[in-house]
Amino acid sequence: MTVLKTAEPVPYSRISGIGGYRAEHAVPNADLIEAIDSSDEWIRQRTGIVTRHRAGAEIGVLEMSEEAAVEAIANAGISPSDIGAVLVATVTFPYATPSAASALTTRIGTGPVPAWDISAACAGYCYGIAQADALVRAGTAEHVLVIGVEKLSDFVDPTDRSISFLLGDGAGAVVVSASDTPGISRSVWGSKGENWETIRMTSSFLELRDTPGTPFPTLRQDGPSVFRWAVWEMAEVARQALDVAGVEPGDLAAFVPHQANMRIIDELAKQLGLPADVAIGRDIADNGNTSAASIPLATERLLREQPQLSGGLALQIGFGAGLVYGAQVIVLP
């Protein structure tokens, strides 16, 4: 009997390099408050956001992804040709097909590797880490590039008070590589499809095409429902992620949740009982909510400002439209 050849699996994976791209235009609250009949104080109190960054018309998902990817690959100490797969988490690439990931392979010079996009909104980056970890441990690829990227400003109604003032643009990227020691825990991930419309588009693109007068689809959310779900249910998901990793809150060097709202971040930290010396990603204050890009961007910032965190454990958790969620414990690169 002929026996099929299979790749050699490896025991573990780790994040070996990280990079980020922050959009060039800083947009303070003062620039948005007239359109939503609000105030700088109201936005700060409800969200913790002081400013957010948004990209110009000439900068899109691919341009931001490329900048972050090049930095992550360089920081991993490898070349683009060493990348064995490319995963791009985004909900704002303006083409249904082909994927942003496939276009990116040519831009960064990986060669003809497998590449695909992940549509999991604010949990997309954690979904990408889960998939990259599996690919590496299975022996399918030695290095996998994972990018979280959004140009949310393309899908904002400036008069909407539910979500528009939260959103920014940016990209964060990591390289997930084979490792002799554990660097990424088993992921805790899932979805609650019954709450699918809690964070949604105002209409479909088919409605835009077929119904005269339909405005361009933009984002909306049921803020109070999202807040309750994120605080109470995601705290339990975060605890499950710690349990499957076999660590306690006191073992963490950092906590990097999706940058949805500063009140959510602070409440999650309280629910988890994090010690005071655990660094917490709070990039939202001046970068806004960048959906799939928020966790890698917040992680990149923590490591840039506190390099001593490298080698420590971090709990990361993403949650958002779908309602989808994902969490894992990683060793910081």
Image (tube, rainbow, N blue to C red):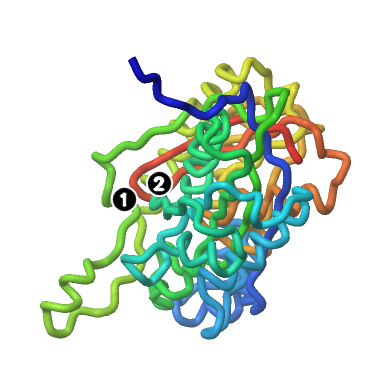
Residue 72 percent across, percent down from the top left: 70, 55
The answer to whether residue 44 is seen in the rendering is: no
Say few, some or many: other residues with alpha carbon within 10 Å of mark 2 (under 14 / 14 to 19 / 20 or more): some
Say few, some or many: other residues with alpha carbon within 10 Å of mark 1 (under 14 / 14 to 19 / 20 or more): some
Q: For the view shown, which residue lies furthest in the right direction?
A: 308
Residue 152 percent across, percent down from the top left: 47, 68
At a point 58% along the width and 51% down the height, the residue shown is 259
Residue that label 1 marks: 198
Q: Choose between 280 and 224: the one closer to the eye.
A: 280
Amino acid type for the residue under numbered disc 2: Val
Q: For the view shown, which residue lies furthest in the front direction?
A: 1
The answer to whether residue 295 is seen in the rendering is: yes
Q: Quadrant of residue 202?
A: bottom left
Secondary element at tag 2? helix
Q: Is residue 282 left or right of residue 139?
A: right
Please state, as top left, top right, bottom left or bottom right, where the C terminus lies in the image: top right
At a point 46% along the width and 61% down the height, the residue shown is 102
Q: Which circle marks residue 137 in the picture?
A: none
At a point 39% along the width and 75% down the height, the residue shown is 157
Residue 168 percent across, percent down from the top left: 55, 67
Residue 138's place in the image compared with 26, above or below, is above
Disc nearer the start of the sequence (2/1) = 1
Amino acid type for the residue under numbered disc 1: Thr
Residue 131's place in the image compared with 58, above or below, is above
Q: Quadrant of residue 272?
A: top right
At a point 29% along the width and 78% down the height, the residue shown is 216
Secondary element at tag 1? helix
Q: Are marks 2 and 1 in contact (CB under 8 Å)?
A: yes
Please state, as top left, top right, bottom left or bottom right, where the N terminus lies in the image: top left
Residue that label 2 marks: 226
